[in-house]
Image (cartoon, rainbow, N blue to C red):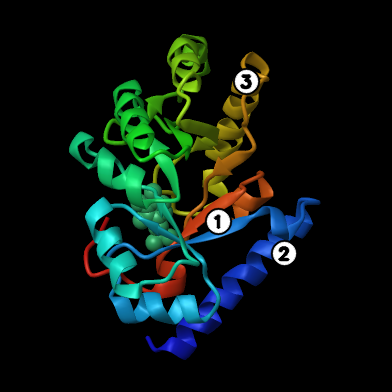
């Protein structure tokens, strides 16, 4: 795939986001497209930046930092969207603009400490597993009867002065049809509303949900971040 095709695909995804927003009575500006560059070569990343992308998503802290350093641009926002191993907390707190994948109280403690050392406030989203798959990261929240039990940990995380919680994120189970992802997106939104009722003083504006296969449905259901990789950049060198 060449730079021209990447630019076309990028524009097409933006147009589809705008149409989905319109269908839902939302404004396209309220949805941020994060282009997921994990597993993609630098030339493709450069092509999508040239096409206008400024928000880029990576799953592996070091892989993303290598790209940041190679591109050497100050106008990009790098989003950490993958599970963060504890020894990578420092790198993430130092180098990433936004964390979508805060998935445990222990990780919050480490990110808080590292963000404090770096003298910054790190914007984070809480990752929830609303699909119930064993293999997924995030607090288990498929069953609404457990939501109440999540509140103490969420409350503790909200106390961290160097973490700015701004909403929630999910990676639903793979589905055959985009429409099948809708109930998961609706569940994440309900969970967000539940948390916002319990902690009205906190900021719950963001819903990070929707990937290449289902981002339009996610926008219809209120996504403020969609994370799209292969639909723009094509197949990755590794699968994940
Ligand atoms: C890889 C990944 C994406 C992007 O997936 P595509 O299907 O290529 O759009 C989005 N979110 C997360 C958390 C990912 O790991």
Q: Is mark 1 within 8 Å of ligand 1?
A: yes
Q: Earlier in the sequence, mark 1 or mark 3?
A: 3
Q: Quadrant of ligand 1?
A: bottom left
Q: Earlier in the sequence, mark 2 or mark 1?
A: 2
Task: Please identify the residue farthest to the right as the structure is shown.
Answer: 25
Q: Work out how far the residue at label 1 is from the one at label 3, CA to CA, in angstroms.
A: 23 Å
Q: Work out how far the residue at label 2 is from the one at label 1, CA to CA, in angstroms.
A: 12 Å
Q: Secondary structure at mark 1?
A: helix
Question: Circle 2 sits on which residue?
Answer: 19
Contact, mark 1 vs mark 3 (Cβ under 8 Å): no
181 w.r.t. 102: above or below = below
Q: Secondary structure at mark 3?
A: helix
Q: Residue at x 65, y 62 (%)?
A: 17
Find residue 41 and name its label.
none
Q: Secondary structure at mark 2?
A: helix
Give the x, y percent position of residue 162: 45, 31
Find residue 194 and name its label.
3
Q: Residue at x 61, y 47 (%)?
A: 223
Looking at the rendered image, the disc whose residue lies closer to the viewer, 2 or 3, is: 3
């Amino acid at each position: 795939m060449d730079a021209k095709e990447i630019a076309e695909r990028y524009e097409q995804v933006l147009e589809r986001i705008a149409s989905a927003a319109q269908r839902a009575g939302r404004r396209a500006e309220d949805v941020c497209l994060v282009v997921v560059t994990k597993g993609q070569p630098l030339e493709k990343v450069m092509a999508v930046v040239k096409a206008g992308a400024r928000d880029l998503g990576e799953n592996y802290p070091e892989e993303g930092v290598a790209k940041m350093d190679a591109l050497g641009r100050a106008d990009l926002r790098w989003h950490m969207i993958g599970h963060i191993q504890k020894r990578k907390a420092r790198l993430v707190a130092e180098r990433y603009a936004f964390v979508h994948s805060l998935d445990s109280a222990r990780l919050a403690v480490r990110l808080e400490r590292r963000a404090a050392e770096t003298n910054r406030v790190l914007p984070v989203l809480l990752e929830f597993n609303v699909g119930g798959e064993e293999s997924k990261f995030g607090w288990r929240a498929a069953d609404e009867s457990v939501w109440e039990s999540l509140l103490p940990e969420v409350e503790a995380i909200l106390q961290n002065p160097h973490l700015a919680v701004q909403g929630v994120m999910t990676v639903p189970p793979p589905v055959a049809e985009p429409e099948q992802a809708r109930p998961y997106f609706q569940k994440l939104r309900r969970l967000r509303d539940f948390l916002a009722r319990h902690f009205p003083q906190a900021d719950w504006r963001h819903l990070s949900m929707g990937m290449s296969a289902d981002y339009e449905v996610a926008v219809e259901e209120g996504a403020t971040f969609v994370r799209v990789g292969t639909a723009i950049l094509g197949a990755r060198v590794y699968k994940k």
